[in-house]
């Protein structure tokens, strides 16, 4: 079939096919994708709403405490760490996930002090069952940065 078409029309056929593909994607595929994305299909209603602004709640404070425990485990035990009483910033992401940003003072065995800012992404695994909120086993560290 393509053998009967002169070679000078191949670029034109390619461009027409490409334009048809782009039009099909914009008129048929993308509206369907947007409809699915706007629906509640992927929404998980956990009862814990997120916030775009930083906030301080009892759960962000628990997440801060658990984050500090994880930081202590990451740093050499010979280094003395002074933890702050509260985080610099804390965000409630929803679905019992939290971002904690804080700064610690570290003093090495030779007396040299330095400050390090760190961020933790913590998740409370027991959802709305807050009975074990103080237990480390009920929290997951999804990410820790700033210590290396």
Image: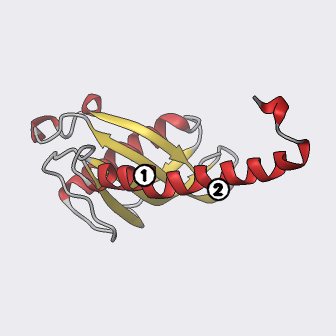
Q: For the residues marked 1 and 2, what is the alpha-carbon distance in whole angstroms?
A: 14 Å
Q: Secondary structure at mark 1?
A: helix
Q: Residue at x 35, y 62 (%)?
A: 90
Disc 2 element? helix
Per the image, the residue denoted by label 2 is 19
* Residue 74 to residue 31: above or below: above
Report whether 80 appears left or right of 89. right
Relative placement, left or right, of 100 versus 39 is right
Q: Position of residue 135 (x, y in %)?
A: 23, 33
Residue 19 in sight from this viewpoint: yes
Image-based side of 3 in relation to 15, left or right: right
Q: For this rendering, which residue is in front, 74 or 50?
A: 50
Q: Which residue ends up furthest to the bottom in the rendered image?
A: 53
- Place of residue 84 in the rendered image (x, y in percent of width and height, measured from the top left): 41, 60
Whether residue 111 is visible here, answered yes or no, is no
Q: Toward the viewer: 74 or 16? A: 16
- Quadrant of res 53: bottom left
> Which residue: 15% across, 35% down?
132
Residue lying at 64% horizontally and 59% vertically, measured from the top left: 114
């Amino acid at each position: 079939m393509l053998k009967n078409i002169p070679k000078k029309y191949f670029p034109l056929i390619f461009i027409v096919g490409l334009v048809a593909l782009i039009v099909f994607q914009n008129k048929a595929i993308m509206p369907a994708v947007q409809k699915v994305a706007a629906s509640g299909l992927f929404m998980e209603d956990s009862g814990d709403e997120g916030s775009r602004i930083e906030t301080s709640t009892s759960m962000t404070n628990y997440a801060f405490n658990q984050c500090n425990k994880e930081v202590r485990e990451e740093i050499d035990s010979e280094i003395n760490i002074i933890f702050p009483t509260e985080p610099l910033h804390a965000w409630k992401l929803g679905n019992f996930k939290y971002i904690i940003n804080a700064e610690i003072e570290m003093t090495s065995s030779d007396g040299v002090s330095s400050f390090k800012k760190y961020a933790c992404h913590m998740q409370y695994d027991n959802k709305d069952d807050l009975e074990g909120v103080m237990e480390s086993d009920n929290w997951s560290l999804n990410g820790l940065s700033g210590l290396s």
